Image: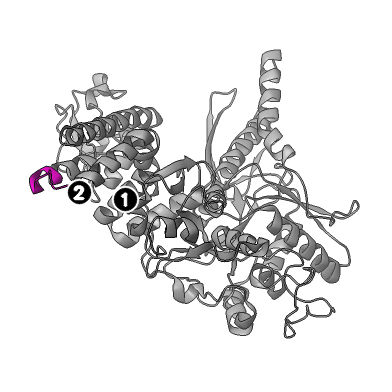
């Protein structure tokens, strides 16, 4: 290998490895030097890591006669962890194929050797990101013989429960429209998360506002400059929240709610944990939060003598409930220990960690009926930290609901509306109309609110201002003449039968190259090769069409600039018109 390649590979290892190495660590006082160790990638907060490390070590000692360590790696949020894992797997595949140390099973499936990845499980985050681990990465390697090997590698591997075990643990695999575990067992739910509003009662009172009980309440103009939001391009959990708002409120009303929230923002942050903290400190009046972040912050304030200053609400009829899974990583060093950990997470002992009072808190009144862990004199539940999460197993609500800190049953709370799958649109459009031009967005919303409360504007003028603020840009579909392979194949008659009469770039090029095969197959409705440009509005009906344009990385970057300019022009025109009549 050339020296330059060696240096490049070494740099890549350092870049990928440092975030994980810097965030190493197990639970407080639980590490045993000679015990087997499980490496866990997680976005979970230290309190959850500490309680699970202690409880898993105790459980493993009782079940297998020795303790076990959890070595947590926390380089960022769920989406960041997934992206880093994708990069690590890509680097590992490069090493395997260059060295020739790879193989395929009898069914021609690529087999990743045990110990390829320095990690065993991913714990926490939403079902979407764990589903992306299952989908995995596409990898291509060109050998010295000029043959190309193409594989799709799942980053997780199935657990080994029987269906009878899963039925006994979960019952029906549903909470609202969502699954509690992947039917193929690539991810298994360990807890449930809802997504709602965290708020500061003192700030709301000063602003003359009631407790928010609907997402639309966060668009109230009196909250201008007081809403704390996370950037959906950085936080998978807040993307899920925004996507659920669209699903429950519908395309038109949902986007108006999101645009109105953006107009009221104090800031956008890259961390979903920041808004609850700032709300509790009075830096913001309200924000969106995962339930346990909101409830946990409210508990911290109450425990520190702040009373009921901070609260959390799940908007009635609009609550999205999602599984918080664990996935066993493909090619991990300890697959057997990883499966043991998954089993532990579903025991009543582990499920009690999520919602029981902490039995080790000093000066805390113990609950007499708190059950003991089977075969021990120790009470169930966390030792020091009350985690305020919702267990995933229904049996916990049937047997122990009276012991829960939060009397919330997600199985009755969950909305029946399935997330529509518009999360890519949330990330792209909110980035363009709310985050990248945040100052213009805020000032335009303030101007629009002024106009609505003024008698200086006619109904027609208000409608025009409203249209400026809530408009969507059209998406320019690239000219077919610019596609690779068009020039030399433009003389062929290419048949494309699709819902809209055309396809995404890669499919079009493939059709050009297989024109004769398409014609011989009797495909109808010939594509008009003279068409060179197409503009598509951004609507519910055209969402997938526009999203396919974004999947081309160069195109997405270009379009995001065009979108941001569109919104900036609209916002500034709105501000100009309002200022003329002030």
The answer to whether residue 488 is left or right of residue 552 is left
Name the outermost residue toward the top: 3
Residue placed under numbered mark 2 in the picture: 452
Q: Could you say which quadrant of the image residue 407 lies in?
A: bottom right
Residue placed under numbered mark 1 in the picture: 221
The residue drawn where x is 62% and y is 78% is 396
Tag of residue 74: none
Q: Dot 1 lies on which element?
A: helix
Where residue 114 appears, x then y in whole percent? 72, 47
10 Å crowding of disc 2: few (<14), some (14-19), many (20+): some
Q: Dot 2 lies on which element?
A: helix
- Tell me the quarter of the image containing the C terminus: top left
Where residue 574 appears, x then y in whole percent? 21, 36
Residue 457 is a magenta residue? yes
Q: Earlier in the sequence, mark 1 or mark 2?
A: 1
Marks 2 and 1: in contact by CB < 8 Å? yes
Where residue 491 appears, x then y in whole percent? 18, 23
Highlighted range, magenta: 454-462
The residue drawn where x is 26% and y is 36% is 517
């Amino acid at each position: 290998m050339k020296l330059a390649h060696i240096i490049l590979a070494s740099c890549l290892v350092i870049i990928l490895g440092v975030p994980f190495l810097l965030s190493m660590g197990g639970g407080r006082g639980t590490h045993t030097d000679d015990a087997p160790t499980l490496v866990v990638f997680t976005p979970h907060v230290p309190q959850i890591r500490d309680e699970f490390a202690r409880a898993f070590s105790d459980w493993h000692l009782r079940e297998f006669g020795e303790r076990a360590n959890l070595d947590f790696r926390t380089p960022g949020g769920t989406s960041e962890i997934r992206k880093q894992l994708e990069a690590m797997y890509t680097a590992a595949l490069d090493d395997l194929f260059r060295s020739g140390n790879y193989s395929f099973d009898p069914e021609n499936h690529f087999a990743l050797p045990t110990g390829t990845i320095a990690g065993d499980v991913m714990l926490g985050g939403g079902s979407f990101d764990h589903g992306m681990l299952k989908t995995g990465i596409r990898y291509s390697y060109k050998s010295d013989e000029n043959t190309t090997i193409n594989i799709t590698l799942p980053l997780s591997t199935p657990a080994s429960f029987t269906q009878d075990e899963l039925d006994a643990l979960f019952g029906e695999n549903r909470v609202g429209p969502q699954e509690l575990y992947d039917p193929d067992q690539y991810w298994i739910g360990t807890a449930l998360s809802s997504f709602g509003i965290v708020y500061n009662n003192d700030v709301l009172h000063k602003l003359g506002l009631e407790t928010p009980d609907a997402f639309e309440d966060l668009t109230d103009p009196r909250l201008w400059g007081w809403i704390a939001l996370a950037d959906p391009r950085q936080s998978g959990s807040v993307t899920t929240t925004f996507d659920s708002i669209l699903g429950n409120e519908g395309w038109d009303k949902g986007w108006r709610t999101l645009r109105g929230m953006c107009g009221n923002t104090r800031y956008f942050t890259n961390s979903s944990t920041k808004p609850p903290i700032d709300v509790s400190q009075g830096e913001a009046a309200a924000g969106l939060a995962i339930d346990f972040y909101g409830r946990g912050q409210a508990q911290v304030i109450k425990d520190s003598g702040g009373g009921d200053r901070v609260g959390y609400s799940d908007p009635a009829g609009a609550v999205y409930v999602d599984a918080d899974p664990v996935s066993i990583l493909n090619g991990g060093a300890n697959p057997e220990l990883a499966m043991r950990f998954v089993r532990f997470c579903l025991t009543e002992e582990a499920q009690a960690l999520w919602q029981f009072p902490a039995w080790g808190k000093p000066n805390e009144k113990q609950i007499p009926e708190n059950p003991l862990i089977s075969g021990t004199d120790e009470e169930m539940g966390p030792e020091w930290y009350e985690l305020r999460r919702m267990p995933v197993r229904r049996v916990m609500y049937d047997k122990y609901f009276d012991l829960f800190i939060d009397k919330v049953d997600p199985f009755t709370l969950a909305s029946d509306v399935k997330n529509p799958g518009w999360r890519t649109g949330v990330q792209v459009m909110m980035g363009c109309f709310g985050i990248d031009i945040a100052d213009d967005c805020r000032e335009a919303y303030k101007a629009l609110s002024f106009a609505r409360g003024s008698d200086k504007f006619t109904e027609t003028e208000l409608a025009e201002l409203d249209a400026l603020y809530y408009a969507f840009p059209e998406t320019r579909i690239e000219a077919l003449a610019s596609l690779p392979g068009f020039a030399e194949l433009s003389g062929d008659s290419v048949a494309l039968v699709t819902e809209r009469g055309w396809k995404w770039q890669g499919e079009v090029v493939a059709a050009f190259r297989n024109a004769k095969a398409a014609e011989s197959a009797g495909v109808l409705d010939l594509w008009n090769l003279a068409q060179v440009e197409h503009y598509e509005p951004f609507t519910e009906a055209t969402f997938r069409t526009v999203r396919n344009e974004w999947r081309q990385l160069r195109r997405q970057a270009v379009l995001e600039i065009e979108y941001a300019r569109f919104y900036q022009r609209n916002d500034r025109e709105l501000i100009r018109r309002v200022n003329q009549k002030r």
